[in-house]
Image: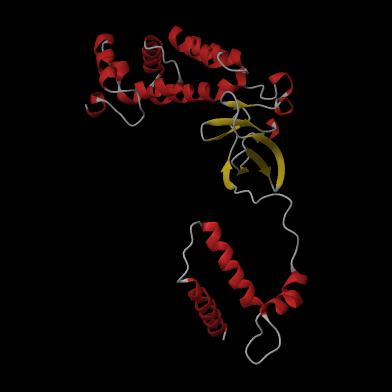
């Protein structure tokens, strides 16, 4: 029945639109005005065999049920899961946003719009940030542990002492991770990554990779990791430089050493 009714309505509209076929319109606005006049005529015309029109039924049934439009436009949002690292930040598209430090290690829900990043914990909003801004970090002061000591097992001094035990180049790379940030805790993620590289590739190889990264002025965790993956730390310095010029540092480029 509904399909039959829809077909009848479509037929009525088509017949009235056909009345415009011999007219020439010079703008879309002019055409829309003509269509609106025909639609008004269609809506006020009584149904066949009845006294009511579409306009009458709209006023009696539909209009009373309508609700006001929302005060704000619909905002598209994307949802993701994230777990903050020891630096109490979550990552969204290469930028980092702070959460209350007590939630470190918890799985949180992120509501991401074009302008904001909202962080939810068990259905309750615990943080909101402007999505875009200066720098890679958006850190709210009240999210920081008091005096940056909530995670007593980690501190800049502990990372520096660990790096110094491996070698001077590793110590320099770690120092840059901690010093080239608005807060030392922002570098914890990279320092923990370097510790993992030491366990995976041995401390000796990590020291060589850090030496290479410092030589090419790219002392980031990503560069050190790529050097190790490509085996460039095992090559003589001159050969390693030549190889790096041909093969840019990238996690997916392993280098010839990988296959031997």
Question: How far across and down, in percent of the image, does residue 154 sit?
Answer: 61, 21
Front residue of 192/57: it is 57
Placement of the C terminus among the 4 image quadrants: top left
Image coordinates for residue 62, horizontal then vertical, percent: 72, 73
Measuring 60% from the left and 12% from the top, which residue is drawn there?
157
The residue lying toward the viewer, choosing from 34 and 204, is 34
Position of residue 215 in the picture relative to residue 107 (left or right) = left
State which quarter of the image contains the N terminus: bottom right
| 83 sits to left or right of 234 | right
Residue drawn 60% across and 72% down? 39
Q: Position of residue 195 (x, y in %)?
A: 48, 22
Q: Is residue 246 left or right of residue 49?
A: left
Farthest residue, direction bottom: 49
Q: Which residue: 66% across, 24% down?
A: 151
205 shown above or below 24: above
Q: For this rendering, which residue is in front, 44 or 174?
A: 44
Q: Residue 199 location, x and y as percent?
A: 43, 24
Asked if residue 15 is positioned above or below residue 157 in the image, the reply reads: below
Place residue 60 in its image quadrant. Answer: bottom right
């Amino acid at each position: 029945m509904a399909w039959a009714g829809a077909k009848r309505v479509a037929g009525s509209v088509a017949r009235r639109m056909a009345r415009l076929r011999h007219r020439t319109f010079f703008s879309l606005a002019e055409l829309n005005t003509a269509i609106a006049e025909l639609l008004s005529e269609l809506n006020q015309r009584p149904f066949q065999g009845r006294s009511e029109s579409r306009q009458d039924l709209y006023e009696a049934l539909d209009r009373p049920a309508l609700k006001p439009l929302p005060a704000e436009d619909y905002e598209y949002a994307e949802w993701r899961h994230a777990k903050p690292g020891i630096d109490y930040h979550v990552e969204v598209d290469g930028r980092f946003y702070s959460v209350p430090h007590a939630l470190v290690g918890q799985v949180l829900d992120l509501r991401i719009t074009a302008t904001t990043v909202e962080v939810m914990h068990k259905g309750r909003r615990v943080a909101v940030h402007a999505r875009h801004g200066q720098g890679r970090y958006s850190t709210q002061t009240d999210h920081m542990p008091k005096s940056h000591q909530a995670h007593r097992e980690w501190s800049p001094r502990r990372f520096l002492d660990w790096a110094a035990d491996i070698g001077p180049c590793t110590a320099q790379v770690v120092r840059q991770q901690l010093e080239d940030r608005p807060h030392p805790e922002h570098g914890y993620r990279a320092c923990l990554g370097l510790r993992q590289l030491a366990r995976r590739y041995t401390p000796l190889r990590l020291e060589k990779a850090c030496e290479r990264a410092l030589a090419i002025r790219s002392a980031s965790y990503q560069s050190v990791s790529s050097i190790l993956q490509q085996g460039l730390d095992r090559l003589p310095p001159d050969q390693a430089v030549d190889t790096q010029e041909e093969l840019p540092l990238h996690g997916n480029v392993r280098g010839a050493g990988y296959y031997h």
